Structures are given as C-alpha cells and as structure tokens.
Amino acid sequence: MTFSSFLELSFWIPLLAAGVRVATPLLFASLGEAVSERAGVINVGLEGMMALGAIVGFLVAYWTGLSWAGLLAAAAAGLAASLIFGFLTIFRGADQVVTGIVMNILLLGLASFAYASIFSSAHVVAQLTAIPIFRVPWLSDLPIIGRPFFAQSPIVYVVYLLIPVFWLLLEHSQWGLSVRAAGENPEAVDSAGINIWYLRLQAVAICGAMAGLAGAILAVIQIGAYVDGMISGRGFIALAIVVFGGWRPWRVAAAALLFGVVDAFQLRLQVSGVPIPSPFLIGMPYILTIVVVAFVAGRAGYPAAINKAYPLRHFSRKARKLLPADSAAVHPLPQENS
Amino acid sequence: MEMKNLKRLRATLVIGTVSILGTTAGWAKDAKVAYIPCGQVNDGSWSQAGYDGVKAAKDALAKSGTNITVDYSENLSPSQAEVAARDYATKGYQTVVLHCGTFANAAYNAGKDFPNTNFLIVVAPKSVGNVWTYIPAMQDISFVAGYLASKMSKSGAVGVVASYNFSNITWQAEGFRLGARYGNPKIKTYSNYINSFDDAGKAKEAAQAEIDSGADVIYSATDQASRGIYAAAETNGNLAIASYSDQSKLSPKTVLASALANIPLLVEEMVSNSVSGKLVADKVYSVGMAGGIGDLAMNPELSKTIPPEVAKDVQTLMAAIKSGQIKVPAISEPGQSEKYDLSELKAK
C-alpha cells in the first residue's frame, strides 16, 4: 500500500466499514449512557457492565447455541447490575462516580473470575460460530455508502434503528421531557408529582441493559469468544463519546462513528508503513477524543443535576404518595408550619 | 511520626539483611526459589509456562542432590511485585524469578538492596550485578514462520499483528517480515501494533486492515488478543500463524502453524544455573533456536495443504538457524526489516 492509495475508493470503503464495526459496541453503550446522564446519573461503571455483558452473553450463547439468547441474557445482566448501582446512588444517595468505580472493579473481577472458574481446564476450546454478514437488498448496492453501511452484521442494523428510537424517546416524548428535567431541575419534576427516584432508576436500567448488550456484541458477535480484558477501555471511551455528542442521540452516533473511523484509519496508516511512530498512531483516536471533549464539553456542559442525589426529605407530598408506605414511615415528612 | 516510621522501616531492613547473611551459608544445598508471574500459575499460558519451568528446575536439581522449595505470588502490579520480591529476599530466598515484562524496575530496585539474592527478570534491557535478564529470542522461529507464510501466500502479501512495539515483540514481528522476504523477496509485508495483549476487537480490526491491503497470511504476536486475528482470518478465508503456544485447536481452519517459545525450558535453565551459581556476570540471556527456544507446531488439519517441498525447505531452514549458518537479526524498529540486506543473513 502506498500513499496514493489513500485517494482511492478501495481504501475508503473498507475504512468506513471498519469504522462502523468499531463504532457499534461503543454506540450501544453511549446511547444508554446518554439517557442515564440526561436523568442526572453518571454511570462510570460502563466498563464493568460491558465486561459482565461480555461474559454472560458469551456463556449463554455458548451453552444454548443461540446468539440472540446470549444478547438477551447480557442485557438482563447489565440491567441487574445497573439496578444495584441505581439503588446505591439514587435511593441511598451514594456518590455516583465513586460507586461507578467500585462497580467497575467488582464486575471486571467477577467476569474474569467466572471465566477462569468455568473454563479452568485449558483443554476446553470455548468459542462460538461466527455470525455471517447480512447484505440489505438494494441498499447494499448503493454506490460508496452501500457496502460500509449495509453489508454488515445484523446487529449493526439494530443500532441504526435504535438511534431514532432513542432520539424520539429522549427528545420528543413525555417520558424524555421528564428525564431531561430530572437531570436539569429535579425539583420541577418532583413538584409535577413524578417520582424522581423511579424515573432515574428507569434511565439507569436502560443504560445498564445497553452496556450489557455492548459487551456481548464484542464477545458474541464480533469475536465469538470471551477474552479476559477484551473491553479494554471501551466503557470509558463511550463515556467520552456521550460528552462529545452533547448528550443527543444523533450527535452521539456521529461521534461514535468518527472515533471508529479514526481508529480504523490509524490501523491502516500503520499498514501503509508511514514513518510515524506506532504509539502516536495508536493514540490518535484517544487524542482526538480528548481534544474534542475539551473543546465541545466546555460549551455544552453536563446536565446540571448530575451526581446530585435527590434526598427523600425533598420529596413533595404529591410525589411521596407514590413511594411504598414503609419508606415514608422511615423518613417522616417534616411538619410544615413548625 | 513519619520519622519514627522511617526508623522502624530501616530497622526492619537491617534485621532482614542480617537474616539473609545468616542463611546464605547453606543455600547451595537447600535453596528457596520464589516465582512472581504476571498472572496465575494455572492460567494455561504465560504464567503457567514459567511455573512449569521452575518446577522442572526443581526436579532437575533434586537429581543432582540440591533440594529447592518453591513459592509463588500471583496477579501483582509492578509495585506490589517489588514489595513481594523484597519480602522473599528478606526471608532468605536464593533466587527470585520475576516472570513479567513490566517488573523490570522491581527487579533492578530490589537487586540493589539485596545483593545476596539472585533476581531473574524476563525481557529487560540489561543484566547487572545480581540481576539477570532472560529473553526468548522469538525472531528465530518467527523468521521460519514468515518463510512458511510467504510460501503459502497466494496474494503476495503477508502481515503481522503485534501487541506492543517493545523489545523482543518487535524483534518477533520484524523477524516474521524478514523471513517472508527471505522466502519471496518480492512479497509485501505489513505490521500493526495494537498496544494490548488482550484487546481481541482491535486485533481483529488490525488483521482486517492488513487483509484489506491484500495480506492472506497473518502472524499473531499478541497474547489472548489472537482470538480476534483468527476471527478476521475465518471471516475472509485466510490463514493465520499463532505464537507462544499451540493454538491450532482455537481455529482449526485458519491456524496453519504455531511458533512455540519453549518458555519452560528457558526458565528451567535460568533457575538451575542461578541455584548452582553458574550464571555469567552481566550476561543477557537472549536465547533463540540454537539454545532450544523456538519450534514450529503444525496444525494436523492444515499441514497436508503445505506442499512437500515447502515442508522440506522449512526443515532445512530450521536446521540452518539452529546450527548458526543463518543468523536472524534482532530488529527493534518496525519496518526496518524491509531495508535489511538479505545477503547479511548468511554467517560469514
């Protein structure tokens, strides 16, 4: 490969296709995280939840022989982990960042422990059969964009559908309006009689399920095997992509694709033998992310109520009626006019 | 308060040193060896290979009348490894094996403070004083793998996906590229570094980038990330060559051969020589095929696809490297193998 080949379509089409593949798991994690952060809960535990999704998804797909069962189980596992995270941060008011870090340590350790104890004998070759790509009729024949975007693994088409779904849900639905308000001005949501805890928990649950799926896509769809440490920081990259995309689904999708394309591009630069040291090339997508996050986040800013617990004593009378009776008994309402 | 702690620490160190002096008299007959790998001694991979070597040394030494006891510490960070190494030295261990590339500073630092203990560190820049480094010089066998790859390539291009651009990993990657050129001077060779031992996703995309550029045989110079390389080769119907251990079972239709490192043998010899006091001062033990490090394990399912004359040439080449007729250089800069003069390979 020479420098002149950078100008040819035969270079750009496989590059774009690779960018879409790299972006897919990142986008699953980022879309979920965007919802959670919009609701005022930053889930730093993405990396761990992805690792959990990878191991659970792999095990279930391996045992049942069904990839989709693996994906569903991974979503369920991610959701379960996020409920623990949500209980601690939303209901008990624990610091979101600290809790997220603890979740990472716990889940990454759990994933590798589970794999090591189930496949302790090195003679077992645990792997899945590869899932063939699916060419979308007509669309995959389009010039230039046909092959990169429409001759992919079926899961890629799922993410194409999820982008508008998340956009409608977050930016054009009643639920989305409440979620966004929960992240900016929780008092307003509360005084409208909506239970802020359950609302945030729903957002966190979506985030956890999407993170579990993201991990399973890597293990079940893209590699067909579980490898310890295979998430390799993708959870943290997804966190940056959310900021980069300004918490909006379409922009998050564009940010994930850009990261994927730059990563695929640096691998091709290495192949071309350009006289740039490989550590710099390897760092390119990360440098880009840092630069763009520093540049974009400076203007956009996080949701105002992020990492701010909403304590029970702030609950309005209207919202408190929605809580189970016992929690109201544990935290008696302050007497007004006293 | 801090001063008091410091004094207490120094007192402990002094007592530790004294206790070593107390035990050194008897170490020739009854030595203690500590093994500190990156991971777990039953990981079925790198850490286990080193542990097997230590155990083999124990058996070999027992036959010659020296009994050693072996202890290990698993899954440590580099700073924890240094603490463990110092702890073992304090307790009078004669040899401490640090079987992890990131533990070099731990070995050099501990080595300075515990002159009566031998520290063996895998893949480090130098041997100094009581610290010796041992390096599997994989470029010998990866050169053979490159030669085989060039003969099996139909497209006229082969590639290598490596973990880190570092020391013997780069030697290995460049050895493969040089071997491919030796087999076919017109071949195109590519390399990619992914900065990870276990990022299978990135390894897959790196292999795909090389396949997109025409490569049809990919050599894996990574650890667990190799699963991604095989996934890419399977998707595209290409061949792969594994490294370190026989991985043909992981992908029977793509892994043509595996370049073995014989890590247990290397560790066994290092430990045996250390315990019996035979290590040469300041010598870097970089051991290639002449020293028994490097072999090729063929995949029984694919070996029949190798033309008999190619299989024969591979055997001849291996014999030539073992006997020193062909000297494979340690090239530590990616891409330099492309400029290497092939006539320099033959020993004068």
Image: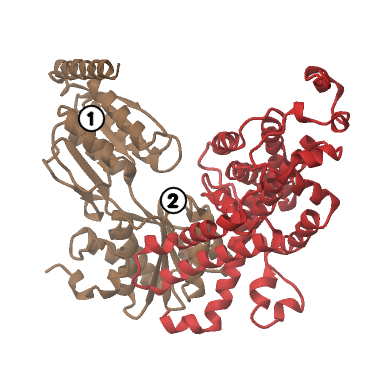
Chain colours: A red, B brown
x and y percentages locating residue B65 in the rendered image:
19, 24
x and y percentages locating residue B38 in the rendered image:
38, 39
Looking at the image, which is closer to me, A328 or A213? A328
**Residue type marked 2:** Phe
Q: Quadrant of residue B29?
A: top left
- In the figure, is residue A2 to the left or right of A133? left
Looking at the image, which is closer to me, A159 or B325? A159
Viewer can see residue A119: no
Chain letter of the residue beneath label 2 in the structure image: B
Task: State how far apart marks 1 and 2 are (Cα).
Answer: 28 Å
Viewer can see residue A34: yes
Q: Is residue B166 above or below residue B133?
A: below
Q: Earlier in the sequence, mark 1 or mark 2?
A: 1
SS type, badge 1: strand
Q: Is residue A11 above or below residue B312?
A: below
Looking at the image, which is closer to me, B345 or B16? B16
**Residue type marked 1:** Thr
Residue denoted by label 2: B197
Kindly identify the residue that appears in the image at 31 percent across and 54 percent down: B294
Residue denoted by label 1: B95
x and y percentages locating residue B176 in the rendered image:
34, 65
